[in-house]
Image: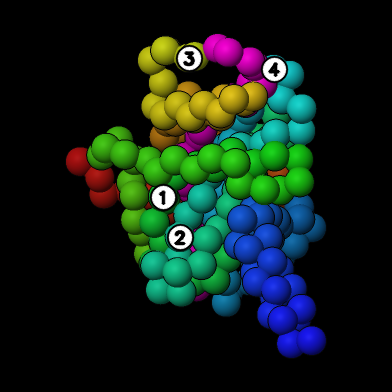
């Protein structure tokens, strides 16, 4: 039967396109790689009865159209990932369930965030300090003052705030990743009015 492999391929393609996985994280023991780019920032998360649901920001490599996901983590908010050089856009955030399935997606809107930037090989780029929240509730509608809010039947994923704390987060980054100190860091906020 030729239909069975075609159906299997279709189902596999659908499952993999809706799954979200963290970008390659950098170890504190890693040395500087002059052929890739280091992206870092603080992605802190408040979780109330989240049942394994997660929150991630996503960036798109505008050259390759591939997505890069960086998860919020309440235990380790300083996230450091390695990506390929290119032209990136800080696009939005996604709500992800415990099976890594994308449940909701929201693009960042407005001009409050530096939306696109060039990531040159060998660079280290600060993305910002983000505060997120994942809450699992039933029948509740959130009407607060936040940057963005999404709601599903059982969960609310939101990015409550972001700020430019380049000096403080970079100092923490340098302390936790001493082998990466040789490359100067820049901020996506540099040059903004």
Residue 117 vertical position relative to residue 103 in the rendered view, above or below: below
Residue of label 2: 60
Query: Residue at coordinates 40% horizontally, 43% vertically from top-left?
Result: 107
- Give me the C-alpha separation between circle 4 and circle 3: 14 Å
- Residue 163: percent from the left, percent from the top? 42, 31
| Residue designated by label 1 | 91
Q: Position of residue 17 (x, y in %)?
A: 60, 62
Is residue 25 visible to us here? yes
**Disc 1 crowd, CA 10 A, few/some/many (<14, 14-19, 20+):** many
Measure the alpha-carbon separation of dots 3 and 1.
Answer: 23 Å
Image quadrant of residue 27?
bottom right
Q: In the structure shown, which secondary structural element does the residue marked by tag 1 occupy?
A: strand
Q: Which residue is depicted at the point 48% across and 14% down?
A: 142
- The reply, left or right, for residue 176 in relation to residue 130 is right
Q: Earlier in the sequence, mark 4 or mark 2?
A: 4
Report which residue position mark 3 lands on. 142
Secondary structure at numbered mark 2: strand
Residue of label 4: 48
Residue lying at 27% horizontally and 37% vertically, measured from the top left: 110
Q: Nearer the viewer, mark 3 or mark 1?
A: 3
Q: Residue furthest bottom?
A: 2
Instruction: Give the magenta range.
Output: 119-140
């Amino acid at each position: 039967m030729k239909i069975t492999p075609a159906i299997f391929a279709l189902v596999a393609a659908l499952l993999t396109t809706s799954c979200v996985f963290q970008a390659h994280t950098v170890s504190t023991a890693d040395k500087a790689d002059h052929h890739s780019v280091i992206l870092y920032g603080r992605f802190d998360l408040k979780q109330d009865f989240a049942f394994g649901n997660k929150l991630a920001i996503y960036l798109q490599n505008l050259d390759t159209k591939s997505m890069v996901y960086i998860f919020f983590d309440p235990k380790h908010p300083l996230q450091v990932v390695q990506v390929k050089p290119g032209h990136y856009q800080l696009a939005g955030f996604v709500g992800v369930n415990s099976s890594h399935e994308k449940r909701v997606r929201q693009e960042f809107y407005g001009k409050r965030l530096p939306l696109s930037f060039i990531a040159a090989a060998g660079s280290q780029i600060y993305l910002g300090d983000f505060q997120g929240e994942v809450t699992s509730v039933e029948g509740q509608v959130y009407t607060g003052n936040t940057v963005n809010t999404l709601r599903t039947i059982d969960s609310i994923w939101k990015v409550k705030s972001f700020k430019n704390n380049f000096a403080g987060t970079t100092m923490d980054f340098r302390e936790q990743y001493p082998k990466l100190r040789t490359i100067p860091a820049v901020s996506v906020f540099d040059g903004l009015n």
